[in-house]
Amino acid sequence: MKADQKHWDKRFGKKDFAFGKEPNPFLKKIIRLLPKGKAFDIAAGEGRNAVFLAQHGFEVDAVDISEKGLKKAKKLAKEKGVKINTFLIDLDQYQIQKERYDLIANFYFLRRRLIPRMKQGLKKGGRVIFETYLLEHRKLGTGGPKQAKYFLKPNELLRLFKNFRILFYREGIFREGGKKKAIASLIAEKP
């Protein structure tokens, strides 16, 4: 935990927002497909997605390992006139409360062992929105993690949620913010 925390505190400790204040483009595009209610933003960082969800009527729990990121998330929420709940948590150790959330959002954070906990944390009919890098992203040279364990294999995200109703899925190389990214994006509903 300490190494991860140190890394992200350093990244989020700068004056500017590391990933900007705008929400993830996929989240922005599909917000109307998501059920209102209680949302859980995994690895929320500086809060851009959590704040966007709060602006759209969600009660948001934003969790991250970085205290500096969460302080900026609170500041951004205040700036945008919304409230979010922030929790300093090591997700490797955290147990998501059973059937608590209508929505779980996971952007560019991949811990496969967390997926069963995410599924358990959703209410029946709740949805997960998930987007992260595919293995082929490494060949593009446009950033992202270094270790292979943080990348999805082809169709892996579909397999990880095979017992859910898949409402939307895409996988491939897309251009976002002027950069090419090899990503998989999913919206799935708990039966």
Image (tube, helix red, strand yellow):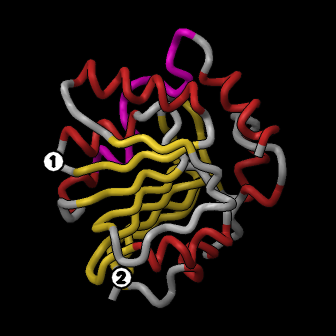
Residue 133: which numbered mark, if any? none
Q: Which residue is mark 1?
A: 57
Work out whether residue 125 or residue 147 is closer to the camera in this orientation and state it: 125
Residue 37 in picture, x, y percent from top left: 20, 60
Circle 1/circle 2 CB separation < 8 Å: no
Residue 22 in picture, x, y percent from top left: 36, 29
Residue 27 falls within the magenta-colored stretch: yes
**Which residue extends farthest top?**
15
Region rendered in magenta: 15-29
Q: Quadrant of the C terminus?
A: bottom left
Q: Residue at x 57, y 25 (%)?
A: 68
Residue 140 in picture, x, y percent from top left: 73, 42
- Decide: is 122 above or below 33: below
Horizontal relation, residue 105 to residue 108: left or right = left
**In the rendered structure, which disc, 1 or 2, sits on the residue that comes first in sequence?**
1
Query: Label 1: few (<14), some or many (≥20) within 10 Å?
Result: some
Query: Label 2: few (<14), some or many (≥20) within 10 Å?
Result: some
- Decide: is 25 above or below 15: below
Secondary element under disc 1, as helix, strand or loop, is loop
Give, as a three-letter code, the residue at label 1: Gly
- Decide: is 163 above or below 13: below
* Rendering quarter of residue 129: bottom left
Q: Residue at x 41, y 85 (%)?
A: 164
Q: Residue at x 24, y 62 (%)?
A: 34
Work out whether residue 187 or residue 111 is closer to the camera in this orientation and state it: 111
Residue 190: which numbered mark, if any? 2
Residue 117 in picture, x, y percent from top left: 54, 74
Mark pair 1, 2: CA separation: 21 Å
Horizontal relation, residue 120 to residue 140: left or right = left
